[in-house]
Amino acid sequence: MYLSSTLCWANAVDEVMELADRYGFSGVEVWAEHIWYRGTDEAAIVAASERYHQELTLHAASWDLNLCALNVGVRRQSVHEVERSLELASRIGAGHVTVHPGRATLAHVPFSYAHWMNESFCYLAKRAEQLHVRLSIELMEQIPKELITTPEAINRLLSMLPSSVTATFDIAHVPMEEDIVRYYRRTSRVSKIHFSDSTVGCCHVPLGKGQLPIRSIMPFLESADVPIILEGFDLSPSHDVLHADLDFLQSLGTSVRRIPCENTCK
């Protein structure tokens, strides 16, 4: 299993590598915004990942961005920030990059969102290929203005893009009434899974603190053939959310080492 760097937001990103090794993770999904916010030296990240034998993936910049914004300036800058993320991934050796799809500027107003999103991703897919990194689009939660919120929606988007572009499946984004494993199997080209709990009103809560059937899906996760990334966001220097997640996994008789991470992120 990999650790999302946002669970250790209080730390510089190179320090997250040591924490990941301490708690038994195989790798770290580094968020571009975390590196930029903390000002962590890229060479320090590479050195720490090698020292602690941590494989790296990257989550592209997503906060404040919209790849299919009605405002062409916002759309172009969003593409630029994701491109910066791809270049960052290439420099630090993170061969797999998760990107959030665009969303509607105005709910229920049918602007050319699909065209603009496809245009953005066609450019980014080509840029990823040039940089020798893999682009993965995240399946989002069903909230107003999000456009790519069902397996069918992401499958349609992927069908218009090169076969090298894949999907990131987020367990916390699955609607409560859906069976998580069946939802996963309806999604094409899944290359990694984001793992956290969820409630009706809030995604990415600590494991066991939400309403998802985490206990019942553990056998599925332990047999998965794609990398699993433990997700969440925690500002505390004591890493309270991470410890809560680890305690919950221990209560199930499992650990992060038992949940596989195939080498598909390279």
Image (cartoon, helix red, strand yellow):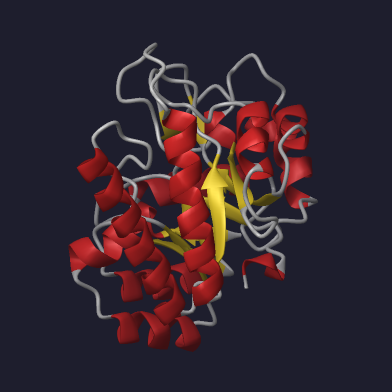
| Total count of labels | 0
Q: Is residue 30 above or below residue 170?
A: below
* Camera sees residue 225: yes
Q: Is residue 193 above or below residue 184?
A: below
Measured as percent of width and height from the top left, residue 179 is found at 72, 23
Q: Nearer the viewer, residue 131 or 197?
A: 131
* Camera sees residue 64: no
Q: Is residue 220 above or below residue 198?
A: below
Work out which quarter of the rendered image holds the N terminus and state it: bottom right
Measured as percent of width and height from the top left, residue 148 is found at 52, 31
121 horizontally vs 183: left or right? left
Q: Quadrant of residue 25?
A: bottom right
Work out which quarter of the rendered image holds the C terminus and state it: bottom right
Q: Nearer the viewer, residue 232 or 149?
A: 149
**Residue at point 55%, 21% (across, down):** 211
Measured as percent of width and height from the top left, residue 70 is found at 29, 31
**Residue at point 37%, 72% (across, down):** 88
Measured as percent of width and height from the top left, residue 108 is found at 39, 11
Q: Nearer the viewer, residue 239 or 33?
A: 33
Q: Quadrant of residue 185?
A: top right
Please identify the residue farthest to the top as the structure is shown: 108
